[in-house]
Amino acid sequence: MADMDPETNPHTEHIGDEEEPLFSNLDLFLFTLIVGLVGKNIIVFYGSQTGTGEEFANRLAKDAQRYGMKGMAADPEEYSMGELARLAEIQNSLAIFCMATYGEGDPTDNAQDFYDWLQENDDEDLSGLNYTVFALGNKTYEHYNAMGKYVDKRLEELGAKRIFDLGLGDDDGNLEEDFISWREQFWPAVCEHFGVEASGDDSSIRQYELKVHNDINMNKVFTGEIGRLKSFEVQKPSGKASWKKPVWRNRALCTVGQSLNDTFCRFRYESGDHVAVFPTNDSELVNKLGEILGVDLDVVISLNNLDEESNKKHPFPCPTTYRTALTHYLDITNPPRTNVLYELAQYASDPKDQENMRKMASSSPEGKALYQSWVLDSCRNIRAILEDMPSLKPPIDHLCELLPRLQARYYSIASSSKVHPNSIHICAVVVEYETKTGRVNKGVATNWLKNKLVNGHKSTVPMYIRKSQFRLPFKASNPVIMIGPGTGIAPFMGFIQERGWLKEQGKDVGETVMYFGCRHKNEDYIYQEELEEAEKKGVLTQLNVAFSRDQAHKVYVQHDLKKNKEHVWKLIHTDNAHIYVCGDARNMAKDVQTAFYEIAEEFGGMTRTQATDYVKKLMTKGRYSQDVWS
């Protein structure tokens, strides 16, 4: 899963059936924009899966104010993008698209309808629309920045005018640095295009104002709900709804310090789907932030947008308490981006701290190096920064405005709905490590899940299902080859369970071959009992396990594939097998693909180019599927 990439999370519920409005959303959007704006108008649409695209869009919209323009970030899912051409009716308007790529070159969930519209409307005339695109992706994936590149090319094909070059952000390198470098060249070009002075105001600009509620009905206060108030108490069915489900079992899967956990909760799903889990920050970390800042975390507050025309009224659900915001809504564990440091610098009483924070937010080589070493390499989150810069005392409301939203974590489901119709299994690495500063950082979601009490107090988990194309073949008689080292085995546990269920139903089930890998058999061979039992019952017709560190030379799944190359080729070329790869995108997925090239070369008499095309056709036909991440 890529883009691993909304301040206002798109996964909210629709509340009942509403009467058809007199005007479309975009009519109202354009009306309020035209009436309320004076001068230049900038709209930043974002396609975001993990929140980074939306964060960049908000930063660009805020930048517009520094140049005397009016900007706003907009979720394409909330508007009729079929009326995009009407933006040209706004004098000197500009549409910016911050587009992340998800999965195997796919649009993000909230940009799917926009993508479909672009594909289906060849007759659309976008002449008069000024635009530019910044793409967010990861070079370890084959379809690097596919969505951003497509939007950039397609808008031009439909007649829109590109006023600045496509920006390419690489999350495998330094996405923040890529964005800053592009942004610093982008704004002077915009100013030149519109004929305005290219000198932005460097002062801090607040987007929200604080309102403290001294006397409020607590039933109207958000307590962690992602969308609708009280949505966890009165749950309504919706494709993107966040539901709270109880944990029914929580167990360690290996012998080393509970580094892998298998949790399952009740839900409806299909094998191969992903589950999105909304985690909660560690209460100890939240309390520490309150202590450092010297505030009462239980004060009920709202942060209200100063731009009354904006469709985004609050940075997170309001009214709520600082404690709830820091616990449920804000990312307090990742290193803050440079824009946060820049905005907070004004609150440092030590001039040296101010200087260093502003330097780290700059594009100078020294500033970039300082940010890389002091923040990123040292894994300093906001707590560590506040502790190591004691002169820095920002108002908590401004800090809450600046911090990005805490995002859902996606996991490949490790069970079959045929065998476990009322529960979902998750297989995840519990993250915990010591930083260069001697602090212990813990993964938000995995530690939170690990500590869930089975059927105990607060054992529920807010989650929703994300449908996947990672599916078993329609014909059970087709063989399947599954390659999933480490936690990449997760979806294959569901596949194995389902193939076993099909056999029990008397179906003709083809060969089911598993290639699994880990470092040591005695330490991290997860699901060993289940795999060996499946092989014993004939559900797995072949189980291949590579233990990379149990011998002098390293052995990986691709080596086992080549060891069985003749059988692998027969399954693929003669028996119409489907291939599934899950796990690491940076090395494993590429090495496995190369192994298939080599097998096709040897047994198919192909050149490398022909073998590459052969594998590409398998992908096109849906016979080579990947669920990989970086």
Image (cartoon, helix red, strand yellow):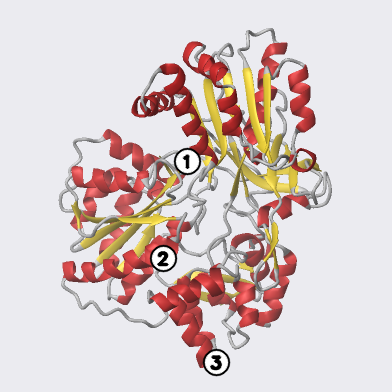
Which is nearer the N-term, disc 2 or disc 1? 1
Neighbour tally class for label 1: few under 14, some 14-19, many 20 plus, Cα within 10 Å: some
Q: CA distance from mark 2 to mark 1?
A: 23 Å
Q: Is residue 527 above or below residue 325?
A: above
As drawn, is 508 to the left or to the right of 56? right
* Residue at the spot of label 2: 177
Using the image as rendered, state which of residue 434 and residue 420 is in the foreground: 434
Q: Position of residue 568 (x, y in %)?
A: 55, 19
The kind of secondary structure element at disc 2 is helix
Q: Is residue 494 above or below residue 327?
A: above
Neighbour tally class for label 3: few under 14, some 14-19, many 20 plus, Cα within 10 Å: some
Specify the label residue 379 is tagged with: none
* Residue at the spot of label 3: 350
Which is nearer the N-term, disc 3 or disc 1? 1
Q: Residue drawn 45% across and 58% down?
A: 173
* Quadrant assignment, res 66: bottom left
Q: How many marks?
A: 3
* Residue at the spot of label 1: 103
The kind of secondary structure element at disc 1 is loop
Question: Which three-letter amino acid code belongs to the residue tagged 3?
Answer: Asp
